[in-house]
Amino acid sequence: MAQKRFFDPMLPSTLQLVLWLSYINGFYGVLDILRGGLGLLGLVALFGAGGAYGIANERKIGYYLATAAGIVNLIVALLAFYAFGAAFLLQVAFAVALVAGALHPTSRRYAKIYLD
């Protein structure tokens, strides 16, 4: 039986970025849920963290889940930035980095070839 892991050091650096940013978003999603609400961002963050776990365990569905969660997070962050201004600039930067890392040609090629 294969060992389950939370991080795969053999991933390309772009997917490692996606992995860590998805886990960080998942952590903040858990904090959001503990604070009292299961809002859109909390749910998306949990899906992203699940996707990161899937990437670490070489599952293609994890890559798709983390990428979709990153895109939704980027859309919500851009809407919040447009509505409230510079207070959401850091969230936009994290979301852009996550989506850029997931859609980078190296990440897409690795996901296409090596992930099951």
Image: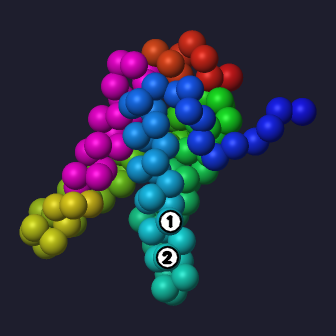
> Can you give x and y, in whole percent of width and height, for residue 46 in the image?
55, 59
Where is the C terminus found, in terms of image quarters?
top right
> Can you give x and y, in whole percent of width and height, for residue 100 in the image?
30, 35
| Amino acid at the residue labelled 2 | Leu
* Residue furthest to the right: 1
| Amino acid at the residue labelled 1 | Phe
**Viewer-closest of 36 and 40:** 36
Q: Is residue 70 visible?
A: yes
x 9%, y 69%: residue: 85
x 62%, y 23%: residue: 115
**Magenta stretch bounds:** 92-108
Q: Are marks 1 and 2 in contact (CB under 8 Å)?
A: yes
Dot 1, crowdedness within 10 Å: few (<14), some or many (≥20)? some
Callout 1 secondary element: helix
Q: Is residue 61 visible?
A: no
> Can you give x and y, in whole percent of width and height, for residue 13 in the image?
41, 30
Taken as a whole, is the magenta stretch helix, strand or loop? helix
Q: In the displayed structure, does residue 92 sit left or right of residue 36?
A: left
* Residue furthest to the front: 9
Q: Which residue is mark 2?
A: 31
Q: Which residue is mark 1?
A: 27
